[in-house]
């Protein structure tokens, strides 16, 4: 058996290093390749006019990310009827001012929001290998209570919530509310971040006649989806997964950062169901998971998973 010669081994090693460097450069560039996705959701009663919901999530904004600020501001030109923000907006203690600058044009549009962990606490440096865990909370060295006790870790969540509600957006933190746009009545229910175990589903309530119930959560944990399905939600909006953040072409997300299956790491899917592409129906709901617009500042890379905002067009269900 002939073994590779020294020069061949060096060439192979150099090729691997070059491929790794190229992949790292691509992943760094892709993390700033912001894009707009579109999807149609057939959930409205027959004869209804379409309704456009802009779903934004996981900005993880730092003060220096002026390109992201400009992208988010420009989303208003899509002319959505409603904006839903599913949390993790900030990644730095000084992010509030640039975040409100980014959201300013959208805050003139009816909207609703929930918070994520990175609205309450600043991200901390962790091993990149935690992204490969099914639920990286197992690898965290501090609990939310310990982080809350350290003032330097706190983010201005209250100030953000005040700014959003003062602009007219509905705070869905473990509560119900409604948005009425024209002849559309959106009956909304939301929970605080399930990733921090802060979710407390409001008690059951009847759906007003002619209304569409929409559930909103930062992290799409199965317990939350179960409760919202029982509650009568026809559509649930969530983020948190980053679409997997590190994906393989032809395979998809490696992990979801929660107990949702990899096939539903991003995009519009029916839930539950044997397959992610099964449509919503009597026994299921529509689930839209945003891949989000950011990353942790300690892992500023994406691979085969561009950062995104999504324009959902709600249309009449067939039949």
Image: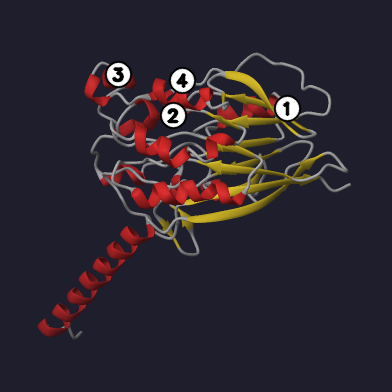
> Could you classify mark 3 by the number of other residues whose Cα lies within 10 Å: few (under 14), some (14-19), or many (20 or more)?
some
Q: Is residue 284 above or below residue 299?
A: above
Q: In the rendered view, does 213 fall on the left or right side of 108?
A: right
Residue found at x 43% / y 60%:
304
Q: Which residue is mark 3?
A: 148
N-terminal-most mark, 1 or 3: 3
**What kind of element bears circle 4?**
loop
Q: Which residue is mark 2?
A: 195
Determine the residue located farthest toward the top in the rendered image: 203
Q: Is residue 15 above or below residue 177?
A: below
Q: CA distance from mark 1 to mark 3?
A: 34 Å
Q: Which residue is mark 4?
A: 198
N-terminal-most mark, 1 or 2: 2
Residue found at x 51% / y 28%:
114
Q: Which residue is mark 1?
A: 232
Q: CA distance from mark 4 to mark 2?
A: 8 Å
């Amino acid at each position: 058996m002939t073994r590779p010669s020294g020069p061949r081994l060096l060439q192979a090693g150099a090729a691997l290093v070059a491929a790794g460097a190229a992949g790292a450069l691509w992943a760094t560039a892709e993390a700033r390749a912001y894009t707009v996705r579109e999807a149609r959701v057939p959930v409205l009663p027959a004869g209804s006019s379409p309704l456009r919901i802009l779903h934004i999530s996981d900005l993880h904004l730092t003060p220096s990310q002026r390109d992201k600020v400009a992208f988010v501001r420009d989303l208003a030109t899509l002319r959505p009827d409603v904006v839903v923000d599913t949390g993790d907006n900030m990644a730095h203690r000084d992010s509030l001012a640039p975040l409100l600058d980014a959201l300013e044009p959208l805050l003139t549009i009816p909207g609703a929001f929930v918070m994520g962990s990175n609205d309450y606490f600043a991200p901390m440096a962790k091993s990149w290998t935690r992204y490969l865990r099914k639920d990286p909370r197992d690898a965290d060295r501090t609990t939310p209570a310990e982080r809350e006790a350290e003032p330097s870790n706190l983010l201005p969540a209250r100030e953000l919530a005040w700014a959003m509600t003062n602009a007219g957006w509905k705070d869905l933190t473990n509560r119900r509310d409604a948005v009425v746009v024209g002849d559309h009545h959106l009956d909304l229910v939301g929970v605080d971040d399930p990733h921090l175990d802060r979710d407390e589903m409001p008690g059951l309530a009847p759906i007003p006649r002619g209304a569409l119930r929409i559930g909103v959560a930062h992290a799409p944990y199965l317990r939350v989806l179960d409760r919202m399905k029982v509650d009568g939600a026809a559509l649930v909006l969530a983020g948190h997964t980053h679409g997997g953040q590190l994906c393989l072409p032809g395979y998809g997300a490696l992990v979801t950062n929660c107990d949702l299956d990899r096939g539903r790491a991003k995009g519009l899917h029916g839930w539950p169901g044997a397959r992610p592409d099964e449509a919503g129906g009597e026994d299921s709901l529509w689930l839209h998971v945003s891949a989000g617009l950011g990353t942790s500042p300690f892992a500023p890379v994406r691979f085969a998973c561009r950062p995104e905002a999504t324009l959902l067009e709600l249309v009449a269900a067939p039949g």
